[in-house]
Amino acid sequence: MFERSSQIQGVNASYTEGQEAQFKAQHDAIAEAVAEQKRKGALFSDVDVQKLIADHYAFVKQFWTPNKQAYKSLALMYVLDPGFEATYEAFEPGLAAYIKKAIEVWADQNLA
């Protein structure tokens, strides 16, 4: 998801390779922590999962500040876009749908 390509556009083009590596590390730490919760059998609405989704939202806010509809739309992309889905499925099978549902719960409770 954070790999350089010839199609980098706009603000992303200004990121250094070091910044991209930092963003990837932040993202991967959150994704792995959510995957671990899923492996434990935690419901996507559990408080620990929801705290991780708050971390995910804070991560996303480094790039833009989505409202409820926009954040839920991003979550939908996680299951509809093959690239996003593959990113999350690499951590744990079913993780893309799990994170989508967790984001929907968090967004409904925390965003306008």
Image (tube, rainbow, N blue to C red):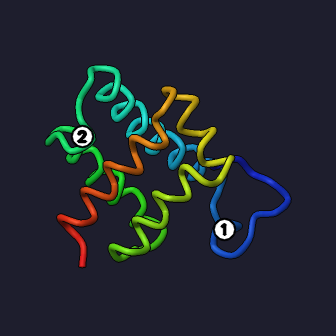
Residue 50 located left or right of residue 95? left
Q: Mark 1 or mark 2, which is nearer to you?
A: 2
Residue 85 located left or right of residue 28? right
Q: Who's the residue at 14% across and 42% down the image?
A: 47
Determine which of the numbered discs, if any, sits on residue 49 in the image: 2
- Of the numbered discs 1 and 2, the one sitting upstream in the chain is 1
The percent position of residue 71, horizontal first and vertical second, equals 40, 67
The single residue placed furthest to the right in the displayed view is: 6
Q: Who's the residue at 48% across and 68% down the image?
A: 63
Residue 57 located left or right of residue 46? right
Amino acid type assigned to the residue bearing label 1 in the image:
Ser
Q: Is residue 34 above or below residue 61?
A: above
Determine which of the numbered discs, if any, sits on residue 14 in the image: 1
Q: Looking at the figure, which quarter contains the C terminus? A: bottom left
Kindly indicate the quadrant of the structure image that contains residue 108.
bottom left
Report the front residue among 67 and 55.
67
The percent position of residue 110, horizontal first and vertical second, equals 19, 67
The percent position of residue 22, horizontal first and vertical second, equals 51, 46
